[in-house]
Image (spheres, rainbow, N blue to C red):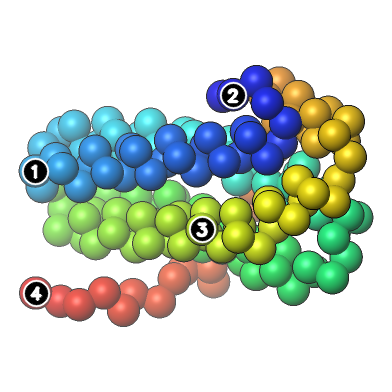
């Protein structure tokens, strides 16, 4: 992770996830490297989701109370991503459903990251104090975090085209 404030930490995670997903896209289907890249992305994503749930969203609700609807929507996105990670942990990379679930995960994560940066992080960086953001960034880098809880109903709609 980065040594910056909370906004820097989360933005760096988003960038790293995009790079991992890009590498996966450039790896042939069925190649074991796809599983390795997914496992790396999943580890980063689990920690990232915990930082958002336990640090970002409470700070955003205190600092940007008019963004409650955005926070609730982003929390739903975390649940969806977590459900996809759970599904993928049970699938082998040779199973056809694996690549479909990966595509759904990539879509969820990249959409979530883009929306979060546009609707929360930029304004949080301007509204919260430098000290609050620095302390939150330190907690994000070194704090003990709990895995985000998931519900079975958090599966995304699979509207990807079938070829």
Name the residue located 84 percent from the left edge and 70 percent from the top edge: 66
Q: CA distance from mark 3 to mark 2?
A: 19 Å
For marks 1 and 2, give the one nearer the viewer: 2
26 up-or-down from 113: above or below: above
User: Label 1 near label 4: C-beta < 8 Å?
Assistant: no
Q: CA distance from mark 1 to mark 2?
A: 31 Å
Q: Which residue is mark 2?
A: 2
Chain-order first, disc 4 or disc 1:
1
Please state if 113 lies on the left or on the right of 103 as rendered.
right
Q: CA distance from mark 3 to mark 4?
A: 28 Å
Q: Which residue is mark 1?
A: 28
Quarter of image, res 2: top right
Q: Which residue is mark 4?
A: 163
Q: Residues within 10 Å of mark 4 (few under 14, many from 20)?
A: few
Chain-order first, disc 1 or disc 2:
2
Number of marks in picture: 4
Chain-order first, disc 3 or disc 4:
3
Chain-order first, disc 3 or disc 2:
2
């Amino acid at each position: 992770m980065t040594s910056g404030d909370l906004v820097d930490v989360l933005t760096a995670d988003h960038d790293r996830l995009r790079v991992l997903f890009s590498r996966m896209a450039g790896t042939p289907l069925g190649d074991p490297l796809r599983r390795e890249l997914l496992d790396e992305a999943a580890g980063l994503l689990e920690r990232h989701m915990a930082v958002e749930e336990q640090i970002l969203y409470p700070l955003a609700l205190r600092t940007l109370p008019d963004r409650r609807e955005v926070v609730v929507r982003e929390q739903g996105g975390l649940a969806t991503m977590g459900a996809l990670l759970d599904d993928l942990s049970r699938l082998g990379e040779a199973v056809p459903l694996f690549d479909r679930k990966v595509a759904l995960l990539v879509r969820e994560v990249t959409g979530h990251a883009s929306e979060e940066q546009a609707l929360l992080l930029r304004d949080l960086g301007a509204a919260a104090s430098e000290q609050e953001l620095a302390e939150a960034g330190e907690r994000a880098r070194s704090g003990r975090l709990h895995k985000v809880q998931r519900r079975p109903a958090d599966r995304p709609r699979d509207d990807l085209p079938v070829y």
